[in-house]
Amino acid sequence: MLQDKDKLTGTIRIDLIPGIPTEPVPSGHKRVVIAPPSRKPRPLQIRSASPGGHSRYQELLHGIYDAVLIADLSGRIVEVNERASDFFAYPRDEFRQLAVSDVVSGADGAIIHDLNRNLDGERHTLIQAHCVRRDGSVFPAEIAVNRLGLGEPRLAFFVRDITLRRQAEEMLRTEHNAIQNSGSGVAVADLDARLEYVNPAMAGMWGYDTPEKLLGQDARDLFADRAAADAMMSAVAQGRDTWSGELIAKRRAGGGFDVQVSAARNRNADGEAVGVVFSFVDVSDRKRAEAALREAERHRVMLESLGAACHHVGQPATVLMGNLEMMRKQLAQADPSVRQLVESSIENVRKLGEILQRLQAVTEYRTAKYADSPDGAEDAGGSRILRI
């Protein structure tokens, strides 16, 4: 008995679109892809339906949202609803001169034969196909087919235009590919900060081989400062719609790096907050470059100050040297100790001049250690001097 019930509720799916992307088949459905026949199928024999008489399907057909095509078992259309005229732009009477293959691309005789065979064992068949309008334009459609057993057997094709859905799917696929291949890290977390989606770029930033290893983790645990991460999460989940700032992240293997974080509230279709969307940019290189620029600017200022100091000290040193030379000439007969002091002064003034010349030639600010700290620690201040 259970087998009979399963047989009645089973559904087969047929794709008539060449190269259609593989999509998940709903639970309980089976997918059957029918390959085009190797030989050209014999054309269907189309006979004109006898006009007159009120169709027994009229009341049902007019109340159905989808376009409905009623065909005999060979695929010849015998009745349609008004929605079908809207979809295909054919007058209702003209449909009786058509076959299903005229309006459903690929639904030739071989397909109709296989369709009848499938319906012998299943209650429904779903078809993904392109439908053809009277003017030759096409639109994507999902078609549910079943067999009507009221009197003479008929095939009922329920056609739904899925153009908007296909466009939305393509847009979602494009956006997904963009996020997956983005150089910035992207993640989605629920209101408890549990990660639900992580793109490859974010996994690489934190040192994970695959994004799946991050799923389920608390996003706040990825940062060195848990309090700052808590504040960020609370600000977005409960207060502001967006938050932006810089935090220090913790890599899986240890160590930290600077990351620019942009967080925005994630909402469902009803506008309710359901989580947070994160965007991460590793700014470690930028921070190092900024630090190097600040250090270079500091060195430039110090070198300019040093050059100015040398210029100001050089002038009195020159005057002092000249005065000492004059004193040495006038003290030729003076006490030897006095002459020795004068000679020593002259020698040191010459050394001062040499030092000033070397200082003026310095183009790179480098220091050298000249004294050890009492505790043996490196002292960046008093124990280093400019290397010239």
Image: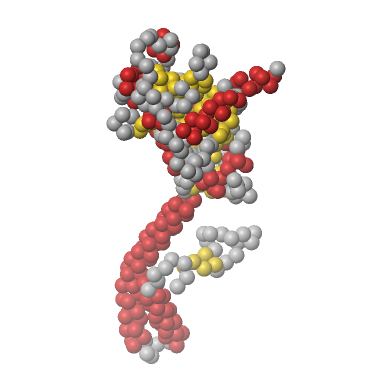
Query: Residue reaching furthest right?
Result: 1
Query: Residue reaching furthest left?
Result: 135
Q: Position of residue 40 (x, y in %)?
A: 45, 41
Colour mode? secondary structure
Tell me: 257 left or right of 316: right
Q: In the image shown, does 196 or 293 lie closer to the viewer?
A: 196
Q: Position of residue 62 (x, y in %)?
A: 39, 12
The answer to which image quadrant residue 311 occupies is bottom left
- Whether residue 243 is visible to the viewer of this picture, yes or no, is no
Image quadrant occupied by the C terminus? bottom left
Q: Position of residue 334 (x, y in %)?
A: 40, 87
The residue located at (30%, 20%) in the rendering is 91
The residue located at (38%, 19%) in the rendering is 49
- Whether residue 73 is visible to the viewer of this picture, yes or no, is yes
Task: Please tell me whether residue 297 is drawn above or below residue 325 in the rendered image.
Answer: above
Q: Position of residue 53 (x, y in %)?
A: 37, 9
The answer to which image quadrant residue 130 occupies is top left
Task: Please tell me whether residue 349 is drawn above or below residue 300 in the rendered image.
Answer: below
Image quadrant occupied by the N terminus? top right
Tell me: 20 left or right of 217: left
Q: In the image shown, does 148 or 131 lie closer to the viewer?
A: 148
Q: In the image shown, does 355 or 129 lie closer to the viewer?
A: 129
The answer to which image quadrant residue 322 occupies is bottom left
The residue located at (63%, 49%) in the rendering is 253
Tell me: 106 left or right of 304: right
Number of numbered tags placed on the structure image: 0
The residue located at (34%, 84%) in the rendering is 325
